[in-house]
């Protein structure tokens, strides 16, 4: 806030002459800056020592001095922002960037994207809304779901190169012949983000808490109890066989936090700062798998950048540039994409639809122009060919004229659920 106040005071001095040399009294300057003459002299002395202006006072009360400006408010703002970033004071940068959306976009662009800050590779991302708290369990926002997966690790995880889960906190697991006992063998080199070694009993305690959450209790309804059967082994005992257990444990909602410190996990990034204006993640030095190339990721919460009259929105965000400020004029697009998710329509079994009618309804949704009537941009939504890898939607013959049941004057609702594809951007 002190930096912003100093900048505002400098702008008050600058504005009457738009930067031209002024012949003015201390009393007039103090009135302009809403402060006492004594404080005004302190401001002038500090600004002159910083190299912002030159003040030549005249002896005698009421005499006009000579005020010469050496830097513009815009260049001063940029210099202050750069200095704040070098000191790791990102919140000060956001305070200094209190401009109109169009000006703010131009001001922040050189600071966004991939940057080397104090010899640390850092990625800064402008974001269109405040983020909800990051915690294990079900979260509605896709950004929160993704970030939770970076902060908290689970017993298993999904790998982009395979459709099956692989080991994470557990390096291996074994399933009994009847499918009722699952033994997960915990890595011995695990550390929490605060540097403490991970104890298997801590993971057990956190899993027990997760199972008390209503949504998680349904996801793991087959689990009878969890036991620590060995200092490095967690055992799941089931009511009935559940061969999707490793998949369920790999979902973002099954990530495990420290039992006493809910913001601390074991993932590749630790939560360094979480405020309504700024979220900063820093790499975890003791991460048990491959370390990320980036050392820090920052989400700058700037919803004013995403106003539709600026040609941006939450689906078409501002550019993230990688390079030096002087290279911005030669920017070229490298890649662009839309966060991948899906929705599905569930047809409730009942007397109103038989099998043939249900198949025809699915065919209408997938193979007609129905999707084009939705109030969304072209190519933003498209029909899929499968629910999961290897689980394709059956293709029935075209030309099916099976009559559909007649609808009354009241529209029949269809249940729509939106899901995020694990591992997708």
Image (cartoon, rainbow, N blue to C red):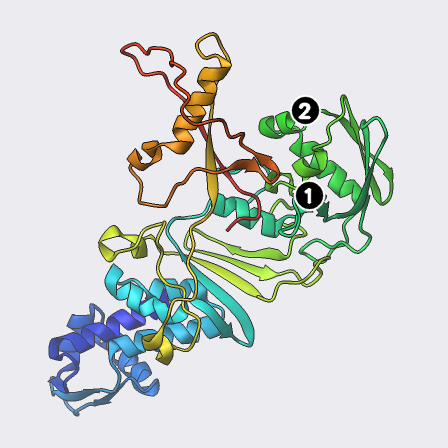
Which residue is at the front of the view, 143 or 390? 390
Residue in view at x 73 percent, y 57 percent: 288
Residue in view at x 79 percent, y 44 percent: 200
Q: Is residue 3 above or below residue 42?
A: above
Estimate the x, y position of residue 418 in percent, counting from the top left. Answer: 46, 34
Residue 221 can be seen, yes or no: yes
Image quadrant for the N terminus?
bottom left
Q: Which residue position holds label 2?
A: 221
Which residue is at the front of the view, 195 or 404? 404
Which residue is at the front of the view, 308 or 366? 366
Question: Residue 181 vs residue 316: left or right?
Answer: right
Counting other residues with Cα less than 10 Å from the Cα at mark 2, is it few (<14), some (14-19), or many (20 or more)? some
Residue 415 can be seen, yes or no: no
Estimate the x, y position of residue 164 in percent, counting from the top left. Answer: 68, 43
Q: Is residue 8 above or below residue 260?
A: below
Check disc 1 and report its element: helix, strand or loop. Answer: loop
Estimate the x, y position of residue 51 in percent, counting from the top left. Answer: 32, 87
Q: Is residue 254 above or below residue 61?
A: above
Count of numbered labels shown in the rendering = 2
Please identify the residue farthest to the right as the structure is shown. Answer: 230
Q: Earlier in the sequence, mark 2 or mark 1?
A: 1
Quarter occupied by residue 270: bottom right
Check disc 2 and report its element: helix, strand or loop. Answer: loop
Quarter occupied by residue 272: bottom right
Which residue is at the front of the view, 370 or 24? 370
Closest to the camera, between mark 2 and mark 1, is 1
Estimate the x, y position of residue 34 in percent, counting from the top left. Answer: 20, 68
Q: CA distance from mark 2 to mark 1?
A: 21 Å
Q: Which residue position holds label 1?
A: 164
């Amino acid at each position: 806030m002190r930096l912003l106040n100093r900048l505002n005071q400098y702008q008050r001095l600058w504005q009457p002459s738009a930067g031209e040399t002024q012949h003015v009294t201390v009393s007039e300057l103090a009135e302009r800056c809403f402060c006492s003459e004594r404080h005004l002299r302190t401001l002038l002395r500090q600004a002159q020592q910083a190299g912002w202006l030159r003040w030549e006072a005249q002896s005698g009360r009421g005499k006009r001095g000579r005020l010469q400006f050496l830097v513009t408010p815009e260049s001063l703002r940029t210099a202050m922002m750069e200095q704040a970033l070098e000191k790791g004071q990102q919140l000060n940068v956001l305070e200094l960037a209190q401009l109109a959306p169009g000006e703010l976009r131009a001001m922040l662009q050189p600071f966004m994207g991939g940057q080397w800050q104090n010899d640390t590779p850092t990625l800064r991302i402008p974001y269109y809304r405040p983020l909800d708290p990051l915690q294990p369990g079900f979260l509605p926002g896709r950004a929160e779901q993704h970030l939770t997966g970076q902060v908290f690790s689970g017993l298993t995880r999904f790998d982009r190169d395979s459709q099956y889960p692989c080991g994470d906190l557990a390096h291996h697991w074994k399933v009994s012949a009847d499918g009722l006992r699952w033994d997960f063998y915990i890595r011995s080199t695990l550390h929490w983000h605060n540097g403490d070694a991970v104890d298997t009993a801590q993971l057990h305690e956190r899993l027990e808490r997760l199972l008390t959450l209503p949504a998680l209790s349904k996801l793991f309804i087959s689990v009878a109890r969890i036991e620590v059967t060995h200092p490095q082994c967690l055992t799941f005992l089931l009511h009935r066989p559940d061969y999707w257990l490793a998949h369920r444990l790999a979902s973002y909602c099954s990530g495990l936090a420290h039992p006493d410190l809910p913001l601390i996990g074991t993932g590749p990034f630790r939560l360094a700062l979480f405020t309504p204006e700024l979220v900063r993640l820093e790499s975890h030095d003791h991460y048990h798998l491959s370390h990320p190339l980036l050392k820090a990721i920052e989400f700058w919460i700037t919803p004013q950048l995403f106003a539709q009259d600026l040609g941006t929105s939450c689906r078409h965000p501002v550019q993230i540039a990688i390079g030096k400020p002087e290279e911005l004029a030669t920017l070229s697009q490298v890649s662009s994409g839309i966060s991948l998710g899906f929705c599905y329509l569930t047809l409730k079994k009942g007397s109103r639809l038989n099998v043939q009618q249900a198949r025809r309804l699915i065919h209408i949704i997938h193979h007609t122009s129905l999707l084009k009537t939705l109030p969304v941009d072209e190519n933003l939504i498209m029909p899929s060919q499968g629910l999961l890898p290897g689980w394709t939607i059956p293709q029935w013959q075209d030309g099916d004229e099976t009559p559909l049941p007649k609808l009354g004057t009241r529209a029949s609702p269809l249940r729509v659920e939106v899901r995020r594809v694990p591992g997708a951007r």
